[in-house]
Amino acid sequence: MALTKVTGTGLETLSDGVTITTPDNTTQLTLASTDADASVGPVLDLYRNSSSPADNDRLGSITFRGRNDNSQDVTYATFRAFSADVTDGSEDTEFEFTTINAGSEVARMTSTRTETIFNQSGSGSVDFRVESGNNANMLVVNA
């Protein structure tokens, strides 16, 4: 599927990055599926189609960016996926969720082949808390 836009001279195919800008907080992109079966939909597929895949390649990321009070662009949170092992039959993935803490990026959750880590080293003094029903502190690990 090619992405096209309407111009004064007809349709133009877009092959580079695309930015959608709106002057307000309305939805900029909607993926809609009108399929009536029980399958999943809609689907957002981040696909890295490399001719030479390698271990630890970044497969994709979703970033949440904004400006600080000094008009600087800041990445406040990121989801990232890596191909830890691309060997056929033994593929492994790593997934990471990071946020900003005191101006520095820290890993809040990292999932690897052998473990899932919450509040990884460098995250500062951060509590881990699980809520259940009306209990705000069903499980608490005090930082």
Image: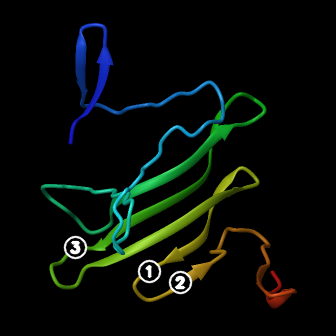
Toward the viewer: 59 or 36?
Answer: 36
User: What residue is shown at x 51% (from left), y 60% (from top)?
Assistant: 79
Q: In the image, is residue 133 above or below residue 2? A: below
The three-letter code of the residue at mark 1 reads Thr
Q: Position of residue 59 (x, y in %)?
A: 33, 60
What residue would you read off at disc 3?
86
Marks 2/1: CA distance?
A: 6 Å
Return the disc, 3 or 1, that comes first in the chain's sequence.
3
The three-letter code of the residue at mark 2 reads Thr
Q: In the image, is residue 14 above or below residue 94? A: above
User: Callout 2: 10 Å neighbours few (<14), some, many (20+)?
Assistant: few
User: What residue is shown at x 72% (from left), y 50% (from top)?
Assistant: 103
The three-letter code of the residue at mark 3 reads Val
What residue would you read off at disc 1?
112
Q: Are marks 2 and 1 in contact (CB under 8 Å)?
A: yes
User: What residue is shown at x 39% (from left), y 85% (from top)?
Assistant: 113
Q: Would you say 72 lies left or right of 2 here?
A: right
| The image quarter in which residue 35 lies | bottom left
